[in-house]
Amino acid sequence: MPAIHHRQGCGENAISRRRLVQAGGLGMLGLSLPRLLHAEDSLRNSGNEPRAKACLFIDQYGGASQIDTWDPKPAAPAEIRGPYQPIATPVPGIRVGELLPRLAALADRYCLVRSMTHGNPNHDGGTHVALTGRSQPAPDSPYFGSVVARFRPSQVNLPSYVWLQNLDVDVQPRFRTAGFLGNACAPLCLGEYDDNPSSASFRMTAFDPPADVSRNRLSARQQLLGGLAPFTGREAPTIDGFQRFQERAFDLVEGPAARAAFDLNAEPAAVRDRYGRMPLGQNLLLARRLIEAGTRLVTVNAWPGYPEKDKYPHFTQGWDMHGAAVQKCGIFSTGQFGLGFALPVFDQALSALLEDLDQRGLLETTLVIVVGEFGRTPKVVNGPYPGRDHWPQCYSALLSGAGVRGGSVYGASDAISAYVKDKPVTPEDFGATLFDALGIPPETRFGRDGFSERVSAGQPILDLFG
């Protein structure tokens, strides 16, 4: 949630109407919600009939190993293939890593892209590339969710863009902003380390007014705003727009609908158990609730959490499995940075999500994406804790829902998953595919001046869709 920079003290009734407009109502409300809701006014109807009404973007922050998950290489030397064997799926010719049995059984519901590629091997730069869809993004290039909030905002009174679970200190906090699109398109961010929906003490407070603003004071401010005489002249359309945002902000704070969407306690215990009580499972369940309620794009940091026996040090880049001494566990272990821990949590949570979306009739209209900022090196390195290092040259992604061709593979890597062999997928083409699925043509103009850039320089990969 964007920070509150302007807060009025006493003497509120003496504030001029012009000052109120300049503040966007923030000082009167003690809230930043009107800026978040301002995205609605930015909608440009492209005329495209979107394949997807919403997108659930699962970010395997840290970079998951493609070889040990979606692109196993059983014929490669031991230092490449690792200890895990591939297992069959119901789709002839498609095999995945053995620690993904539930997802293997659902292979007919997703497409594996085995030819993702870019050139930035650092977490900060790679994340910025992967989440902007730009090989050379400017520092203030907006992430996918902000662009969606700009052009396809929610049609109900919910934030258009929500981010679940923080990224860590090895990346700049761009995920909390909307870059040059401004605060109106920034995400509502929930989940800071242990303070996430898997915690029994977690409570969603984003819609709470400040502690010094009681419900009576909030009601009085609403009445004051409602009692202002209509504006006329050149400023009238802008003022009317801000008044609509203020009304929506009051509705979010006072009304039950938005709070209900964020309330995991409304879910049966059996459903919460099916997703898994780890951060990833509960964040995915919350994401499903938000998508069902009308949020357009939810990004989930796919942090599995940590095993109780290995609680610290704890970082949220759970897929960064170097196996280096600082992590003190190898990539093939059951420690916090081990696939033996992370993949069973991931397998349970993602399979539950896909089945749940399908059973609720949401998979047809929800684009599900699973991808990290890059993959891992083909060769296992380091000791005494073996691991795989950063590798953006070739890695994998999973797409499901919204007409994605289930039971398929797009692209191919070479014999050791080091380089793309066939059908490379650039950040630009990946971003164009996401935008096109949501009804935002890649050629749509935007930018700091509103028109000098395309939303994406890539071309949608239409072969991914049936």
Image (spheres, helix red, strand yellow):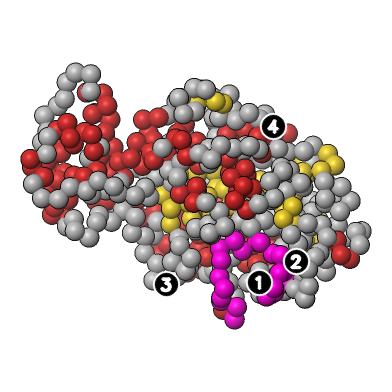
Mark 3 vs mark 2, foreground winner is: 2
Local packing at callout 3 (Cα closer than 10 Å; few below 14, some 14-19, many 20+) is few
Per the image, the residue denoted by label 4 is 462
Three-letter amino acid code at the position of disc 1: Gln
Local packing at callout 1 (Cα closer than 10 Å; few below 14, some 14-19, many 20+) is some
Q: Main secondary structure of the magenta part?
A: loop
Q: Earlier in the sequence, mark 3 or mark 2?
A: 3
Using the image, tell me which numbered label, if any, was put on residue 39. Answer: none
Looking at the image, residue 223 lies above or below residue 273: above
Left or right placement of residue 406 versus residue 91 in this view: left
Mark 1 vs mark 3, foreground winner is: 1
Q: Earlier in the sequence, mark 1 or mark 2?
A: 1
Residue 77 picture location, percent across and down? 91, 62
Residue 372 visible (yes or no): no
> For residue 434: magenta?
no
Residue visible at 45% across and 45% down in the picture: 177
Residue 457 picture location, percent across and down? 63, 28
Left or right placement of residue 48 versus residue 154 in this view: right
Left or right placement of residue 113 versus residue 264 in this view: right
Per the image, the residue denoted by label 3 is 200
Per the image, the residue denoted by label 1 is 327
Most extreme residue toward the top, as rendered? 233
Judging depth in this view, the residue of 265 and 231 nearest the camera is 231
Residue 227 picture location, percent across and down? 10, 36
Q: Earlier in the sequence, mark 4 or mark 1?
A: 1
Three-letter amino acid code at the position of disc 2: Gly
Judging depth in this view, the residue of 52 and 205 nearest the camera is 205
Using the image, tell me which numbered label, if any, was put on residue 387. Answer: 2
Q: Earlier in the sequence, mark 3 or mark 4?
A: 3
User: Mark 1 and 2 residues: CB-CB less than 8 Å, in contact?
Assistant: yes
Q: CA distance from mark 3 to mark 2?
A: 33 Å
Residue 261 visible (yes or no): yes
